[in-house]
Amino acid sequence: MGASDRPIRLAVIVGSVRRERLAPHVVSWFTGRLAQRDDMAADVVDLLDTPLPGSLDGDAPEVAAYRRRIGAADAYVLVVPEYNRSFPGVLKTAIDCCTVEWQAKPVGFVSYGLSRAGGLRAVEHLRQVMAELHAVGVRDSVCFPGVLDHFDDDGGFPRDEAGAALAAKAMLDQLAWWALSLREAKARRQYV
Ligand SMILES: Cc1cc2nc3c(=O)[nH]c(=O)nc-3n(C[C@H](O)[C@H](O)[C@H](O)COP(=O)(O)O)c2cc1C
């Protein structure tokens, strides 16, 4: 397998560190979907296990290790709950800790929230931030409005597995197209 056809290294960044967070349910379902694909290899970057200093000290060893991990990825999926019509501050710190690592790479979004907005307001804010970092946001995202309604009576998630799987496939297919296309383009010429 050459460099051009090795699986896409996909960093799945978990954007909530709250005690009793719902994020693990969403991430566990999503990584299950990823396991069905042979074109992607996932690295789950859980910000709960990735302590980052608030001061954005680039020389701190934990920041350097985190930057290497982000830099090694070909593409990203941000798993993001909506907090106060935007995304959690911990995710902003995680984004701001890196610069060139994000460049010329695609990013997709899995969002959720208690309201009917389903985290889409967080996603729209993230699109602006990621564009500043020269990342390419893919059009389709996965979203779970009224997230508690997506748990079935036994606590299974998501209740509408088929619908969620379709949304994930649309987003991941777009992400794969961009990741492969940008990989080829970067092999030919350096990004500006
Ligand atoms: C500080 C805070 C602000 C929130 N603001 C919103 C909001 O604006 N819109 C929304 O739909 N849900 C909002 N919620 C609900 C969260 O999206 C919901 O609790 C979700 O489960 C949070 O993800 P987590 O459990 O993985 O941390 C908020 C929750 C918190 C803790």
Image: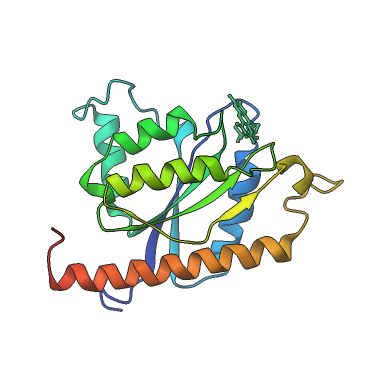
Q: Quadrant of the N terminus?
A: bottom left
Q: Quadrant of the C terminus?
A: bottom left
Label tally: 0
Q: Nearer the viewer, residue 146 or 157?
A: 146
x, y percent for residue 66: 31, 39
| Left or right: residue 103 compared with residue 86 | left
Please, is residue 33 above or below residue 26 in the view? below
Q: Quadrant of residue 25?
A: top right
Please, is residue 190 above or below residue 55 in the view? below
| Left or right: residue 37 compared with residue 165 | left
| Left or right: residue 168 compared with residue 60 | right
Query: Residue at image x 61%, y 42%?
Result: 24
Q: Nearer the viewer, residue 37 or 147?
A: 147
Farthest residue to the right: give it.
153
x, y percent for residue 2: 26, 77
x, y percent for residue 185: 21, 71
Q: Quadrant of residue 73?
A: bottom left
Query: Residue at image x 48%, y 73%?
Result: 38
Query: Residue at image x 52%, y 70%?
Result: 37
Q: What colour scheme has been applied to the protein in the rendered image?
A: rainbow
Q: Quadrant of residue 142?
A: bottom right
x, y percent for residue 111: 57, 46
| Left or right: residue 113 compared with residue 152 | left
Quadrant of the picture in which ligand 1 is shown: top right
Farthest residue to the top: give it.
55
